[in-house]
Amino acid sequence: VHPHLATVTYLTAVGGPTIVLNRESPMQARHLGEIFGPIESALLSRPVPGKHIVFDGRLLHGAPADADAWALPGGGAGAGPRITFLVNIWLNHCPSSAEAFPDDKIGELSDWVVPESAVASEEGQAVHVSLVEHAQAGEELTQVTMAFKAEAKAKVNIPLPLNALKGKLSQEGGSYLMAFGDPEVQAEAACACAIVEDRKMKVKERKQMERALGRKGGRGR
């Protein structure tokens, strides 16, 4: 059962951004084919301490390290680990693996002061980025691959303007609403994003995965 809402709170400003695709994850293995095909848009969220994002818990998402434009020379990224605090919210459902946090451990938690630089993320604050316009302007697009091996044996190929993200579009803790090209239009094919089958996966692995998902009746995040 997917969460009603998924949330991410960033505790550091380093590491790959969170990418939320405009594509829902199917509930059951027999519907895995529904995820394949073009993706029209995605939200890219750059980490900064104290930033908090909320999105539909059904949407496919991840944090590929290859999308970390700010780790490139001149990108302004700091050193250290990428640390996030993840909270999912279910309505009228409790995951079978959920356990209450031990009372005797609560006192060991330390206080954390939200930095003044913390950025609240809302869709209205996101910078709208047209991949077609970037390509037409002759700007380089980098293909970033994000695999969903744990669930769908699939991968998504995402064209991103990494140089622009670390340059003229760079914002500390910025959020970007990426609009991809239409794969049916030849001039926009290089700007298209799509989920495709990961053919590197063995048939045996795929069948084992499908049987496992079939027994569980779907998975959350």
Image (tube, rainbow, N blue to C red):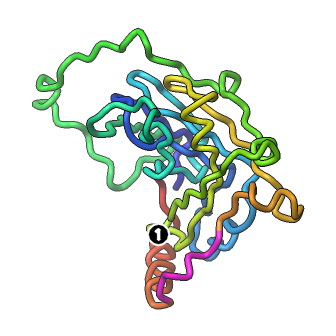
Indicate the quadrant where residue 109 lies.
Answer: top left
User: 101 or 45, which lies in front?
Assistant: 45
Dot 1: few (<14), some (14–19), or many (≥20) neighbours within 10 Å? some
Please provide percent x and percent y for residue 131: 74, 45
Task: Work out whether 160 lies above or below 82.
Answer: below
- Residue 200 among those drawn in magenta: yes
Indicate the quadrant where residue 127 lies.
Answer: top right
Q: Which residue is mark 1?
A: 149
Our reading of the magenta stretch's main secondary structure is loop
In the image, the segment drawn in magenta is: 196-202
Please provide percent x and percent y for residue 12: 34, 30
Name the residue rendered at 56%, 57% in the picture. Answer: 144
Name the residue rendered at 51%, 76% in the picture. Answer: 214
- Residue 107 among those drawn in magenta: no
Please provide percent x and percent y for residue 139: 70, 45
Name the residue rendered at 54%, 39% in the picture. Answer: 5
Residue type at mark 1 is Lys
